[in-house]
Image (tube, rainbow, N blue to C red):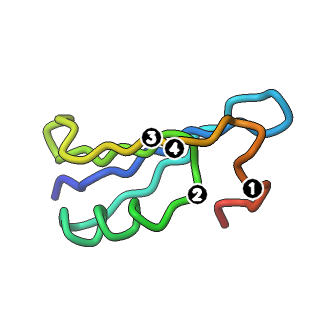
Amino acid sequence: MSKHRVRAHRWVDGILSTFEHLFDNAEDATSFASSMDAHVVKVYDPDGNVISSKQSTVTPDEISTRSYA
C-alpha cells in the first residue's frame, strides 16, 4: 500500500536537517505536518504530488532546537 509522506526541513547549527515520516492517509499526515516546528513542511500523496505545504515566517536560527523524535 502506498503511503502519504511528510517531509520537513529545518536548519540546526547551520546544517540543513531533513525529516520524513509516512502515514496511511492524508488526514493524519496533514494533522502531523501542521504541528511540526520546522522551516518548511510538505505533505505528499502516494504519487509524489505535494498536497500541503507550509513555510515558517521565522529565520532558520529562530526555530527551536527540539528534536523530531
Give the spatial CA distance, label 2 vs label 3: 10 Å
Q: Is residue 11 above or below residue 38?
A: above
Mark 2 or mark 1: whose residue is earlier in sequence = 2
Kindly check if marks 3 and 4 are in contact, taking CB atoms under 8 A apart as contact: yes
State the residue position of label 1.
64
Q: Is residue 65 above or below residue 44?
A: below
- The amino acid type, in three-letter code, at marker 1 is Ser
User: The N terminus lies in which quarter of the figure?
Assistant: bottom left
Question: Which secondary structure lies at badge 1?
Answer: loop
Q: Nearer the viewer, mark 2 or mark 4?
A: 4
Closest to the observer, 26 or 47: 26
Q: Where does residue 24 sit, x and y in percent of width and height?
A: 23, 67
Q: Where does residue 37 sit, x and y in percent of width and height?
A: 58, 57
Residue at (74, 45) in percent of width and height? 62
Closest to the observer, 22 or 58: 58
- The amino acid type, in three-letter code, at marker 4 is Ser
Mark 2 or mark 3: whose residue is earlier in sequence = 2
Residue at (56, 47) in percent of width and height? 19
Give residue 58's quadrant in the image: top right
Question: Which secondary structure lies at badge 3?
Answer: strand
Kindly check if marks 2 and 1 are in contact, taking CB atoms under 8 A apart as contact: yes
Any mark on residue 56, and which?
Answer: 4
Any mark on residue 55, and which?
Answer: 3
Give the spatial CA distance, label 2 vs label 4: 8 Å
Side (left or right) of 63 relative to 24: right
Any mark on residue 37, and which?
Answer: 2
